[in-house]
Amino acid sequence: MTHPVVHLCEKASVVVLQDGDIVHEFRKSKGWIYLLEVLRHPGECRYAYSLRTAEHPIPEEYRFSNIISETERNQHNLYAQHYARSIKMADWRTIKEVSQRLNRLIAMEAELRVNNDIAALEEVLQEKEQLSQYLQEVMGKGGRLRNFKDSGTKAVVSVNKAMRRCLKEIEEVDPPLGRYLRKRVRIWHRVVYEPGEIELRC
């Protein structure tokens, strides 16, 4: 049984889609660079973080890396692989100390208002506002500590958003192909295209 064939080819600054009677040109964005890189290697897991390197051509002396696997690339340090690390924005001891200080400031504020000590009240209110703002920044919903977002996590999010925009563009002009790719292209930290009933030629 032969599968229907869809062609995706790069021409200068555009990507041309040809699916039977449908012919459409897309502006070649970063998302398209990532998506084409994944589609050219069906069944092979790529890391979203390393896909960013596909934006830049590989120097001639390292061109052999085009035919080796992602695992081998990482062994040769040719592609970066990001592992998300959770780094808390604060520790619970600091949170406890800040909260205790904030409670003391609230009590001081009440006393100063009763005594109408405007000068001292201004300093207390300023410190109270700073500490309250700090707690809002480091504490999330449900009383959980927030994590710092490192550059690697931001890169993964950026790659995923760019690829999803491309899939949406495809679905707008070729709904069956768009739905097929949404099912077959798994996206997040690990990105992989699992081929199915449509043959893609890139």
Image: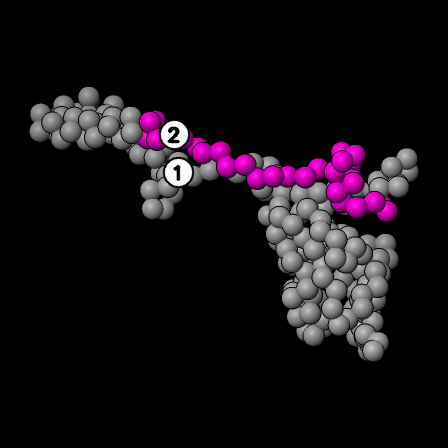
Q: Residue at x 77, y 71 (%)?
A: 198
| Residue beneath disc 1 | 145
Residue at the extreme top of the image, as rendered: 120
Label 1 sits on a secondary structure element that is loop
Magenta span includes 141 = no
Label 2 sits on a secondary structure element that is loop
Q: Which residue occupies the foreground of this view, 166 or 94?
A: 94
Q: Which residue occupies the foreground of this view, 21 or 180?
A: 180
Can I make out residue 36 in this image?
no
Find residue 91 and name its label.
2
Q: Residue 177, relative to residue 104: is it above or below?
A: below
Q: Position of residue 148 (x, y in %)?
A: 49, 36
Task: Tell me how far mark 2 sits from mark 1, CA to CA.
Answer: 8 Å
Q: Residue 174 occupies which quadrant of the picture?
A: bottom right
Magenta span includes 71 = yes
Q: Are marks 2 and 1 in contact (CB under 8 Å)?
A: yes
* Amino acid, disc 1: Leu
Residue at the extreme right of the image, as rendered: 60
Q: Residue 129 occupies which quadrant of the picture?
A: top left
